[in-house]
Image (spheres, helix red, strand yellow):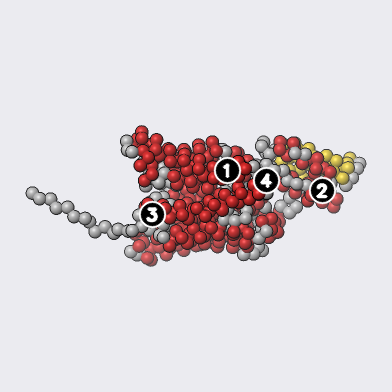
Amino acid sequence: MKTITENGPFIKSKNSTTKMMRNLLIALVPIILFSFYYNGIRLYNLKAISLIEMFKPLLLILVGTLTSFLIEVIYALIIKNKKPFEYSFYSYSIFPGLFLSLIVPVNTPLILLIMAVCFGVIFGKIVFGGFGKNIFNPALVGYLFIFVCYSSTLTSSLDAISTATPLANLKGFDYVGTYNDLVLPYNSIFDLILGFKGGALGEISGLLCIIGFIYLTITKVIKYKIPCTYILTVFIMTTIIALTNNMGLWYPLLHIFSGGLLFGAIFMATDPVTTPITSFGQIVSGILMGIITVICRSLIPGLVEGVMLSILSVNLLVAILDNIGVKVKFNIKKCIIPLVILILLVITLSLYIGLSKVKTSKKDTPSLEIIETIKNNDKTTYTLYSKGYSGKIKLKVTFNKDNINSIEILEHQESEFIPKVVSSGLIDSLVSSNGDTSKVDSVSGATFTSKYLKETINALSKHHRGA
């Protein structure tokens, strides 16, 4: 009996995986070079860092990439019983470590990065069977490891930046404020778009991320529907929030060009393995990511960035979204109701967040929570709470007539930052400022804690003199 074997009617594409990964690297190169300039060369020229520290951004990338590659080599050697270096190369093992190094703070300790890459590759990729079988983005699994297990270290790295990142500054004002408060510290929206701001290596330049998106779309590397619907959803929701709080178009642009939203939407949310393949699934996943991101940023205390959680959350729903997507492909009417529900959800949540911020802003102006007031002749002693980075700070402030006599910290949850505030002499400076805290510098390494204390003392002084 003669067996005849023929090729099936498969659709072949010239856009091979190797070519796609090469194009992905090409899109990342300008971002890496700009980040090296902004976080390395520029600071060295300003004499803010040493020559060795200038190369920290490149070292971060090198260590993350190499760690990711070596883990796959060990995996191939022990488990797969294949040629380790060849397997690691063709499984594109460098990308989890590369992406993770681009989304962590620049000051992240190298040992912490190595641990996160190991966790991300092992538990986000290898346990599922290796390349092409993982359901979660390995780089984001590694970032989640840092966020959950070493959040204090991550916070210290972020807070150690003398000028707060735009998104962290947004959090400091509870995501509602004026153009002068939220944008002017970074000159203009145009400067934010170009990338003249603090942040992780991959999230600095929004313009380069957009250029990368155009290049990757033209070369058919990514699914353009996901980043487009993701960013559009965030834009619509933040625009509604802006309108309910008398803020301009600059507010949604600030959200889009702050933090890792653009980088996450373009480079992380489009991972071909962990994202939907159907058009319906891609559109819905983008909308869901946008909703979760805005909720995390606006309503969940302690969270500065919601991109990581939004992408990982939608990773869980990929199979369900594709299953629905296949069914509605041949009956377009079936997708109308789910999309209408999502649109109504976007509008409702946006109005809820926007209106709640209006109430909050009115309630918190001035930001004072006085517990007790004791008057004794010319002396007046206030016991009150100040806002803190990790929680409330209980203060005891004494006035002698209209002059501040003493400031005492009674209770706090700022275990890392209050010692820096005290050792820096900030408390003495606040006493001598006599309520005019505009000339008192914030403490590097405790940026937000010192900022909140300055605001509280300023508000209390105005309250005392007006009482």
Give the alpha-carbon distance from disc 2 to disc 3, as whole Å: 62 Å
Q: Which residue is mark 3?
A: 19
The answer to whether residue 256 is above or below residue 412 is below
Please state which amino acid type lies under the numbered disc 1: Lys
Instruction: Name the residue located 49 percent from the left edge and 47 percent from the top edge.
Output: 99
Task: Judge by depth and name the residue closer to the eye, 413 or 433.
Answer: 433
Q: Nearer the viewer, residue 287 or 362?
A: 287
Q: CA distance from mark 1 to mark 2?
A: 40 Å
Q: Residues within 10 Å of mark 3 (few under 14, many from 20)?
A: few
Contact between labelled residues 3 and 2, with CB atoms less than 8 Å apart: no
Mark closer to the observer (2, 3): 3
Q: Please, what is the three-letter code of the amino acid marked with disc 4?
A: Ala
Is residue 407 toward the left or the right of residue 62 in the image? Answer: right
Marks 1 and 2 in Cβ contact (< 8 Å):
no
Q: Furthest-bottom residue in view?
A: 333
Disc 4 to disc 3, C-alpha distance: 40 Å
Residue at image mark 1: 56
Residue neighbourhood size for the residue with mark 2, other residues' Cα within 10 Å, grouped as few (<14), some (14–19), many (≥20): many
Q: Are marks 1 and 3 in contact (CB under 8 Å)?
A: no
Look at mark 2 in the image and give the residue it sits on: 435
Q: Mark 4 or mark 2, which has the lower sequence index?
A: 4
Given contact means CB atoms under 8 Å apart, are the residues at marks 1 and 4 in contact? Answer: no
Image point 44% across, 49% down: which residue? 315
Residue 112: mark in rendering: none
Mark 2 is on which residue type? Gly
Q: Earlier in the sequence, mark 1 or mark 2?
A: 1
**Which type of secondary structure does the marked residue at label 3 adopt?**
helix
Q: CA distance from mark 1 to mark 4?
A: 13 Å
Q: How far apart are the alpha carbons under marks 4 and 2? A: 31 Å
Which residue position holds label 4?
A: 48
Q: Visible in this render: residue 88?
A: yes
